[in-house]
């Protein structure tokens, strides 16, 4: 991996999110991978807990510069800019938000992933293709989801369209889901076996995220875009388009 002057080009950062207190969890922590425009990993992958970095940064530029510094890319002399793809929900189900904010219930509750309180529109669509999405409400990813949404609220608060956030200058933020990306066979991340636990698994997922960030900027036609009925507040999981199995 070659260290480059990070100010010279738009960079692509993948963040596999750990919980707020993931420094106590050896098997799941924050992980970062940075790619350049050619798709090469630059600097060094990083793994740890970003909580203090999130707390200490006061601007989007400072937050991004600290992420790059963790990956041994130094502090660029000019303001950095990057697309950041995050492996964590960046929204809660609209029905759930309406229920807790105003006590407004839905008429019917479906089973499992058809339950609109537990799963977002983007997640409910995955069940038909055999993908079992995690829920920020019922599964053990609430800590990761609030951590990621906190970062978006602080450093990329402008929603351009469903599933895309920005600060207008330094950061563009999207959500992705490495397991879905691999299931769709639309992303090449080497040929080595996928790690199952610990440091290598977190870094592997962060690299998948970074590659989705790059495709989002340079080859967006490869990714499935939000449908017209996607609630803007729920966000969208960006992933490769489904590969047709027809002859």
Image (cartoon, helix red, strand yellow):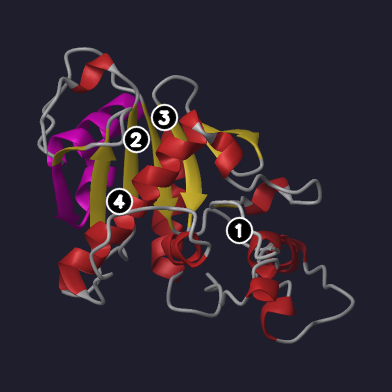
Q: CA distance from mark 2 to mark 1?
A: 24 Å
Relative image position of residue 72 (x, y in whole percent): 9, 36
Which portion, as a residue range, is magenta? 44-70
Q: Quadrant of the N terminus?
A: top left
Q: Secondary structure at mark 1?
A: loop
Answer with left or right where residue 24 lies relative to residue 30: left
Relative image position of residue 57 (x, y in whole percent): 26, 35
Q: Earlier in the sequence, mark 3 or mark 4?
A: 3
Magenta portion: prevailing SS class: helix
The answer to which of 45 and 211 lies nearer the viewer is: 211
Look at mark 4 in the image and give the residue it sits on.
207
Relative image position of residue 107 (x, y in whole percent): 90, 76
Is residue 30 something one can see in this rendering?
Answer: yes
User: Closer to the observer: label 3 or label 4?
Assistant: 4
Look at mark 1 in the image and give the residue it sits on.
243
Could you tell me how many numbered marks the image carries? 4
Residue 84 is drawn in which quadrant?
top left
Taking the spot 80% from the left edge, 82% from the top edge, the residue there is 109
Q: Earlier in the sequence, mark 2 or mark 4?
A: 2
User: Closer to the observer: label 4 or label 1?
Assistant: 1
The answer to which of 110 and 220 lies nearer the viewer is: 220
Q: Are marks 2 and 3 in contact (CB under 8 Å)?
A: no
Relative image position of residue 60 (x, y in whole percent): 35, 29
Look at mark 3 in the image and give the residue it sits on.
171
Q: Is residue 184 above or below residue 222?
A: below
Q: Are marks 1 and 3 in contact (CB under 8 Å)?
A: no
Look at mark 2 in the image and give the residue it sits on.
12
Q: Secondary structure at mark 2?
A: strand
Q: Earlier in the sequence, mark 4 or mark 1?
A: 4
The answer to which of 133 and 61 lies nearer the viewer is: 133
């Amino acid at each position: 991996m070659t260290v480059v002057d990070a100010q010279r080009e738009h960079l692509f950062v993948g963040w596999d999110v750990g919980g707020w207190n993931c420094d106590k969890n050896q098997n799941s922590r924050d992980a970062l991978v940075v790619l350049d425009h050619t798709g090469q990993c630059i600097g060094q992958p990083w793994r740890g807990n970003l909580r203090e970095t999130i707390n200490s940064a006061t601007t989007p530029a400072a937050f991004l510069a600290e992420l790059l510094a963790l990956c041994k890319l130094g502090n660029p002399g000019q303001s950095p800019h990057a697309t950041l793809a995050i492996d964590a929900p960046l929204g809660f189900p609209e029905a759930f938000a309406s229920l807790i904010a105003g006590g407004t219930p839905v008429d019917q509750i479906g089973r499992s992933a058809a339950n609109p309180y537990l799963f977002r529109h983007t997640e409910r669509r995955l069940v038909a293709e055999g993908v079992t999405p995690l829920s920020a409400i019922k599964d053990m990813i609430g800590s990761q989801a609030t951590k990621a949404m906190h970062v978006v609220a602080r450093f990329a608060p402008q929603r351009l369209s469903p599933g895309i956030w920005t600060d207008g200058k330094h950061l563009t933020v999207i959500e992705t889901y490495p397991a879905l990306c691999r299931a769709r066979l639309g992303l090449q991340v080497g040929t080595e076996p996928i790690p199952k636990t610990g440091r290598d698994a977190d870094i592997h997922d962060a690299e998948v995220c970074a590659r989705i960030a790059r495709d989002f900027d340079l080859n967006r036609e490869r990714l499935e875009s939000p449908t017209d009925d996607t609630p803007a507040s729920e966000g969208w999981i960006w992933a490769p388009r489904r590969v047709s199995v027809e002859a």
